[in-house]
Amino acid sequence: QVQLVEFGGGLVQAGGSLRLSCAASGRTFISSAMGWFRQAPGKERELVAAITWSSTSTYYADSVKGRFTISRDNAKNTVYLQMNSLNPEDTAVYYCAARRRMIMATTPSEYDYWGQGTQVTVSS
């Protein structure tokens, strides 16, 4: 079992940066692939970035490549999402998710545990 809590959301102006953190509890974190998803009003939940258990591989949605960076610190049971050059289209609730497997996945149904979400609002 893994419990996830996100931190770091808020209001930022376009062009600004935010860093999201996801603190995980549970002994299986180190063996879990992790992902950051987002969901804007009226839209489906989409994968923003994912990372394998060992950090050897990462995935980014085309819309965030070059602007967002996912990382993890297994010693701290924490995964991060550094978001730079934010624009209003990035406004959404951001969710941290974990799999019971070490390899990444791209769809929400492939993730087993979810945080409660944190709101990110980018003003123009």
Image (cartoon, rainbow, N blue to C red):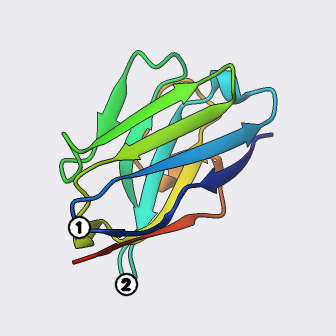
Identify the residue under disc 1.
14
User: Residue at image x 35%, y 71%?
Assistant: 91
User: Could you say where residue 75 lies in the image, as x and y percent from the top left?
Assistant: 68, 19
Asked if 50 appears above or below 31 in the picture, the reply is below
**Neighbour tally class for label 2: few under 14, some 14-19, many 20 plus, Cα within 10 Å:** few
Q: Secondary structure at mark 2?
A: loop
Asked if 81 appears above or below 33 in the picture, the reply is below
Asked if 56 appears above or below 64 in the picture, the reply is above
Question: Residue type at mark 1?
Answer: Ala
Using the rendered image of the protein, determine whether residue 94 is visible from the camera's viewpoint.
yes
Identify the residue under disc 2.
42
Q: Secondary structure at mark 1?
A: loop
Q: Nearer the viewer, residue 84 or 70?
A: 84
User: Residue at image x 23%, y 45%?
Assistant: 67
Question: Residue type at mark 2?
Answer: Gly
User: Could you say where residue 25 lies in the image, as x and y percent from the top left?
Assistant: 79, 38
Q: Quadrant of residue 2?
A: top right
Using the rendered image of the protein, determine whether residue 111 is visible from the camera's viewpoint.
no
For the C terminus, the quadrant is bottom left
Image side of residue 113 versus residue 59, left or right: right
